[in-house]
Structures are given as structure tokens and as C-alpha cells.
Image (cartoon, rainbow, N blue to C red):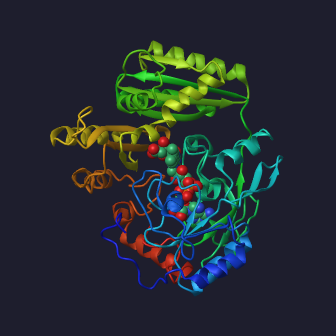
Amino acid sequence: SDSYPNLKRDSRFKEVSADDVKFFQGLLGEGSAVLDGVTQNTGEEDFEAYNSDWMKKYRGQCRLVLKPATTEHVSKISKYCNENMLAVVPQGGNTGLVGGSVPVFDEIVLSLSKMNNVRSFDDVSGVLVADAGVILQQADEHVANHNHIFPLDLGAKGSCQIGANVATNAGGLRLLRYGSMHGNILGLEVVLPDGTIVDDLGTLRKNNTGYDLKQLFIGAEGTIGIITAISILCPQRSNAVNVAYFGLESYQKVQDAFKEAKKQLGEILSAFELMDHQSQDLYRQASGAKLPLEGDHPFYCLIETSGSNTEHDKEKLDSFLEHVLGEEIVSDGVVSENETQLQSLWACREGISEAGQHWGGVYKYDLSIPLTKLYELVEECRELFQNNGLMHAEDEKFPVKEVVGYGHMGDSNLHLNVAVRRYDKEVEKVLEPWVYEWVAKRKGSISAEHGLGIAKKDYIGYSRSETMVRLMKDIKKLYDPNGIMNPYKYI
Ligand code: FAD
Ligand code: MLT
Ligand code: ZN
């Protein structure tokens, strides 16, 4: 594959034949459930959405897409593929950022998009049971009708799927408040590579009977089985939600503001997000939006509060504002007055992902770094590019446009993005392994929330010991002895 010059197709995998297509058509029916470029003259453009990732950085050559409608279907497909050595890539909304959701060579894409029913919601316990292919935003709207909230929110909510959110252990914008998938997932239904259906779709909060096997599939990125349904604990939705957006003078002040926010907003704090000036400037240029504050500030942060009592929250937020402005921790700030304003403040944060690749492409690093040192990486990276003649904000001849830092400050999770005009080997050589070494030296993680996919798999050793990698490989062998599930990736 052109995208992967250093990889060779694993010759143990069979190429999809007309007989295979016939089997799948017999199972799923012809038409919309099977996109077939093996026996049909289906054009490459029809496969584009399945072969190409969100960043337009990775590209596979799949010629068969399957869209099962039931867990039984997934089971029969897996069993057949396992017996016939056909490699498979599970795919959700294809918004993943590490090249994990698209084939490397001619793997079959198994799309979960037709498995999109809510199975049940219990408004006493708050437990939602739903098919893996339900879109995150639709899951949230469903529970919102019962005054609950899906405990995960992220910029790709309009297209990503809840099963895939579990498969990537997505973190997102409110992890600070609601915690990770590892805590909120109560049960999973999973199909193993040999077709076995593992029904662990329980709804219990407590269940200490043996190994908690479902945890293995959370963040496994489709390498040991296909998640077909999830059971998840949804908290009560807050009546009062407020968002504030601040300009700050230095990264030290951002840390001070975070400390104050925890101290003064405590239980109502639901997000604390960091954006540097450069990230907001890219967002402004790419979207044409007007930024919320007048003038330039080196840093910005977005604080969200969610509580059950509007007056109580407003009082807390007002005294917090008075304090951080009075003490000159923040230089300027604005608080949302209505839902539209709230959305436009959030857009300044969520819109950075799209803005980052507006000029042609983006190198994305998703890192856990101790908070005190978190922003130093961005400064050093910017310096590197300033000194080596690869970066210019305006001049098209230079591959790099800008280096930006933003992320989930409340979770010590930095997103370092290098916005480029084209993907370029020279730029890559500057960044890797430099970024990974920098992070490892500070005992951080080279993948905080996006996963390994194909982008990070060679660098796992910077964050995990040899012993741990060996144990992971043992698990992969145990669950997927033929290696048909999302090959060439992860470990
Ligand atoms: P895909 O991209 O289709 O798949 C992701 C991985 O999961 C692949 O390895 C795939 O093989 C596997 N997979 C998919 N479905 C299944 C299944 N049913 N069973 C087993 N394996 C499966 N991530 C964060 O953590 N936090 C963020 O704040 C965040 N914000 C984002 C904002 C934007 C604008 C974008 C584009 C992405 C963002 N992401 C974020 C990346 C995030 O990982 C994905 O958005 C999401 O979790 C993946 O969902 P998806 O349906 O698109 O999955
Ligand atoms: C985010 O926090 O915006 C996401 O993780 C996506 C990204 O890194 O751009
Ligand atoms: Zn993120």
C-alpha cells in the first residue's frame, strides 16, 4: 500500500474471492448490506469513505464492505473469516485519529453502522443498553429525553459510534467529571474472532466474580473482538450548565486558574479545557468565526459547570469570576448567557481539530504529561521548527504552517498539533522520535486517549515495559490466534 511503504501484506491472509462474496451475500442479502468491488465493477470512489481516514493520512485498498444488522450476522461473518483466513477491520464512524479504522491492504471492512438500535434505558438506574453502531449524539439525545446524559462527549459526536468509543476508550471533554469508559461501562456484548458471542451485557455496578474480562475490550481498538452492544451508566443530566471562556497571560496563570476552579467550583466543575493563542488563531482563520474576547491573549481556557440548582451555580461561578479577575489570574473573560452562546464558546475548543488540518494536513500527538510541564513541549517544538527553516505562517513554500497546543487540561492531556500544508518526510523526521522521547523522559504517555492504531504502534515501548508488551501479545494470541482482527496495528 502506498501509505505504508515499510509494511508488507501478510501472505497468510487470503484474498477475497467470488465464493466469499457469495457467502456474505447469502447471509446479509444483496444490496445495501454488501459493497462489493470483488465481483462487481464498483468504482474506487465508492470505497473512499471506508478506505480513507478522517485526516486523509492513511489509505487502504479494501474491495469489500459488510454491514451486518445483527449480532448473529457478526458472529457468522467472523467465524467464516477466521476459518478462511480473511482479515477484518471493524469500523464505526471512521473518525479515529490514529489510522486504526481503515484497512492497511485489502482487509474486509465490517461496518457497524446498521446496528443502531437502543435496546433499553432504565431511568431509575440510568443504565443504557444499546447496539454498538448507535451514533454518540443520538445516544445522548435518547437519554436526554429521560433527563440523563451520556457520560462521554467529544467533537466527533455527530458521526462516531458508541461501540467504537468503547473500543478506543475515548476520553473527551467531560472525563474530568464523569470518569472513563473503564468505570462507566457495566457490560459488553462481544463477538470473538472465531464467532463466539460473549454475552456480558450486564447492568450491575458491582460484580466481583472473577476477572473483569470486559475491561480488555475497552481500548483494544478492534484487535481481539468486535463489540456489538454496550451497557453504560448514564448520570442525571444537569439543569444548570454554564460555560466561561478566559484569556490568560501565561501557562502559570492557567495552572493557577485550574487550582482555583477546583477549589471554588468543586462538585459543579464539568470541564476545564486549554487552548493556546495559536490554536484559537487557526480556528479563527479556518472557520471565519469571531473569537469571544477582544485582543490577543497567549492562552485561553474554557470552563464548564453543571449542577442541579441554577441559582446556586450562578452564585458560585460569579464569585469565582470575581476572584480570578480580581487576583489577575485571568486577564479577561466571558460567560455564556444562553444556549447559542454556550455552543459558540464550545465551538472555539471543539473546532480546533478541523481547523488544524484546514491547510492540507496535521501531525497529531495526544499525550499525557505531568501538568506543570505540559506546555513546555509545545514551546520546544515550535522552537525546533522556527530554527530549522520548515515553518512559516504565510509562505506556502514551507511545509509547516503552525504548531499549536490545546487539550484536556483537567486530565493532564495535551494535544500537540503540527498544522502542515502537505505531509512531508522532513517534518516527520523532526517530530519522531523526538516527541516520544520527550514524553517518556517525563514519564508521560505517548497515547492518552486516541489509542495506538497504526500511527503509534511502533512507539508503545516509550510508555509500556517489555514485560507488559509481552503480556499484551499473549492476550492477542489467545483471543485471535490467526491474527485476522485489525492486523498490522496496535501491538
Ligand atoms: P472508528 O474511527 O471507526 O474506529 C476506531 C477504532 O475502533 C478502530 O481501530 C476500529 O477498528 C475500532 N472499532 C470500531 N468499532 C468497533 C467495534 N464495534 N468493536 C471493536 N472495534 C471497533 N477521541 C477522544 O478520545 N477524545 C476526544 O475528545 C476526541 N475528539 C475528537 C474530535 C474529532 C473532531 C475527531 C475527528 C475525533 C476525535 N476523537 C477523540 C477520536 C476518537 O477516537 C473517535 O472520534 C471515536 O472514539 C472513534 O469512533 P468512530 O466511530 O469514529 O470509530
Ligand atoms: C480533541 O480533544 O479535540 C480531540 O481529541 C481531537 C483532536 O485531538 O483534535
Ligand atoms: Zn482530546
- Residue 441: give x, y in percent of width and height: 29, 53
- Residue 14: give x, y in percent of width and height: 49, 84
- Residue 92: give x, y in percent of width and height: 59, 58
- Residue 388: give x, y in percent of width and height: 16, 43
Seen in the picture, residue 415 relative to 249 is either above or below; the reply is below
- How many numbered dots are placed on residues in this image? 0
The residue under the point 44% across, 59% down is 99
Residue 147 is at least partly visible in this image: yes
Q: Which residue lies furthest to the left in this view?
A: 388
Splitting the image into 4 quarters, where does residue 31 fall?
bottom right
- Judge left or right: residue 2 versus residue 212: left
- Judge left or right: residue 187 versus residue 398: right
- Judge left or right: residue 327 versus residue 87: left
Seen in the picture, residue 94 relative to 259 is either above or below; the reply is below
Front residue of this view, candidates 150 and 441:
150
Splitting the image into 4 quarters, where does residue 429 fall?
bottom left
Seen in the picture, residue 457 relative to 176 is either above or below; the reply is below
Q: Where is the N terminus found, in terms of image quarters?
A: bottom left
Splitting the image into 4 quarters, where does residue 300 fall?
top left
Residue 194 is at least partly visible in this image: no
The residue under the point 74% across, 68% down is 70
Q: Where is the C terminus found, in terms of image quarters?
A: bottom left
Front residue of this view, candidates 468 and 34:
34
